[in-house]
């Protein structure tokens, strides 16, 4: 079903919301005005949940540039994680301005969808360094940083764990197990499994070709060997206080009381706080025992960005709108309406943002995080490896053999 809302504010504002799953198409029009030849028509793609937020942002943009142009801004919901796929289907007729996850940046630049941002130095100065890095290819800025909250950290019930307990994963498992509860982490996703390998000296990443991976997770030398991590994971999997579950399982467990701590992201903050009430706590990830050492858990960090289509008919105005969507004031508005963590330095350090336990935990964890720059061959081998451990090693292969198989898959051409 398609619903079009045309609103005169004083310039023309159009809001189009596409809802999937309907067999027919309806059109609901409040006020409609066809743009004349002098109208600046811009199409914006963003998350479906951002509709009200973007409506307010568009109104502010048109007020700022009142009298300079007549605008027709059309909003179309588009998943940030699948933005590139949609754009590549018809790049020249795609959105003028679009939100996307930072791991799509290389593809968008290579395809010619993005050109270098003109006011790059101002954006570098006003945004967090890691957010700027996420929006750059070889030190050239190609997109506008929007959020700095696509990562993970520890949620825990303060009624169960003390501040000392949450420093150690091993201690948390013991406390949870003694009380019949669970500490959860999703091992079916390599996004979370990276937490256990990331600070060990074992490496994984994208080769210069931008497609294939390098990986040393099966190394047999060094202070921490691949088998050290695998043994630690084997011990975790057997612990009565541990549970590997996906996002839906995490929330279900939090709500029914079986999960008393878990690794997740800011998107679950409201639901977890509702379930735990005064017990709601959030912190950086703990350390865990590996090879006789305490290893601080790492994390992948992610950022949402705003891109300007290089084929936009009104590229200059599209860039102005992208800059407006991502400015300090509108990042603060995004936090208030959507709870998303700002990439803007001033917004990120505001008292309002800092008072959010989830955002504060994410910022604390950021010291131990790195950008997700991984080729497509990474995911399935990692899932197969962790499933073997969770199942109790039904293949009978040694841990080194399993690591070798995983790395061969990750680094496959």
Image (cartoon, rainbow, N blue to C red):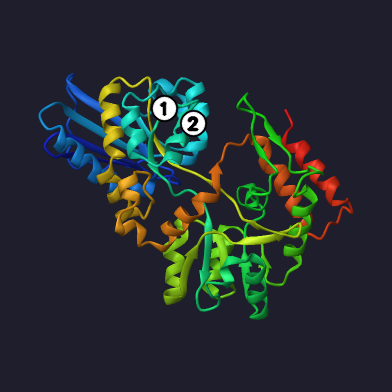
- Sequence-earlier tag: 1 or 2: 2
- Local crowd at mark 1 within 10 Å, few (<14), some, or many (≥20)? many
For residue 251, side relative to residue 379 (left or right): left
SS at mark 1 in the image: loop
Where is residue 222 drawn, in percent x and y?
77, 45
The residue nearer to you, when weighing 79 against 266, is: 266
Image: 105 above or below 330:
above
Q: Residue at x 44, y 65 (%)?
A: 271
Q: Which residue is mark 2?
A: 105
For the point 45% across and 56% down, the residue is 267
Which disc, if any, is residue 142?
1
The answer to whether residue 205 is visible is: yes
- How far across and down, in percent of the image, does residue 306 sit? 38, 35
In the depicted structure, whether residue 129 falls above or below residue 91: below
Please identify the quarter of the rendering in which residue 116 is found: top left
Q: Is residue 148 above or below residue 12?
A: below
Quarter in which the N terminus is drawn = top left
The answer to whether residue 258 is left or right of residue 223 is left
Image quadrant where residue 169 sits: bottom right
Q: Nearer the viewer, residue 178 or 46?
A: 178
């Amino acid at each position: 079903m398609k619903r079009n809302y045309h609103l005169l504010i004083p310039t023309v504002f159009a809001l189009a919301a596409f809802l999937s799953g309907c067999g027919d198409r309806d059109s609901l029009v409040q006020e409609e005005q066809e743009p004349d030849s002098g109208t600046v028509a811009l199409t914006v793609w963003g998350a479906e949940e951002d509709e009200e937020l973007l409506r307010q942002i568009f109104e502010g943009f048109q007020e700022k540039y009142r009298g300079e142009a007549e605008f027709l801004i059309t909003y179309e919901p588009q998943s940030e994680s699948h933005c590139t796929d949609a754009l590549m289907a018809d790049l020249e007729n795609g959105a003028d301005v679009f939100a996307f996850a930072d791991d799509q940046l290389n593809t968008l630049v290579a395809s010619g969808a993005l050109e270098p941002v003109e006011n790059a130095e101002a954006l570098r100065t006003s945004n967090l360094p890691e957010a700027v890095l996420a929006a750059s290819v070889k030190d050239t800025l190609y997109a506008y940083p929007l959020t700095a909250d696509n990562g993970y950290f520890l949620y825990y019930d303060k009624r169960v764990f003390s501040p000392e307990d949450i420093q150690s994963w091993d201690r948390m498992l013991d406390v949870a197990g003694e009380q019949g509860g669970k500490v959860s982490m999703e091992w079916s996703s390599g996004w979370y499994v990276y937490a256990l390998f990331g600070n060990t000296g074992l490496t994984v990443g994208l080769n210069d070709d931008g497609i294939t991976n390098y990986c040393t997770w099966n190394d047999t030398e060094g202070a921490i060997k691949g088998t050290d991590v695998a043994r630690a994971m084997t011990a975790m999997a057997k612990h009565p206080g541990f549970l590997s579950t996906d996002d839906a399982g995490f929330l279900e467990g939090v709500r029914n009381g079986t999960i008393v701590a878990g690794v997740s992201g800011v998107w679950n903050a409201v639901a977890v706080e509702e379930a735990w009430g005064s017990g709601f706590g959030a912190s950086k990830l703990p350390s865990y025992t590996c090879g006789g050492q305490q290893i601080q858990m790492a994390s992948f960090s992610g950022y949402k960005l705003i891109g300007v289509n290089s084929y936009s008919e009104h590229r200059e105005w599209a860039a102005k709108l992208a800059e407006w969507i991502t400015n300090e004031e509108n990042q603060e508005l995004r936090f208030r309406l959507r709870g998303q963590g700002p990439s803007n330095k001033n917004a990120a350090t505001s008292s309002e943002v800092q008072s959010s336990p989830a955002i504060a935990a994410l910022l604390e964890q950021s010291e131990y995080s790195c950008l997700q720059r991984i080729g497509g061959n990474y995911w399935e081998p990692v899932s197969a490896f962790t499933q073997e451990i969770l199942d109790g090693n039904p293949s009978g292969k040694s841990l080194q053999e399993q690591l070798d198989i995983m790395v061969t898959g990750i680094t496959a051409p």
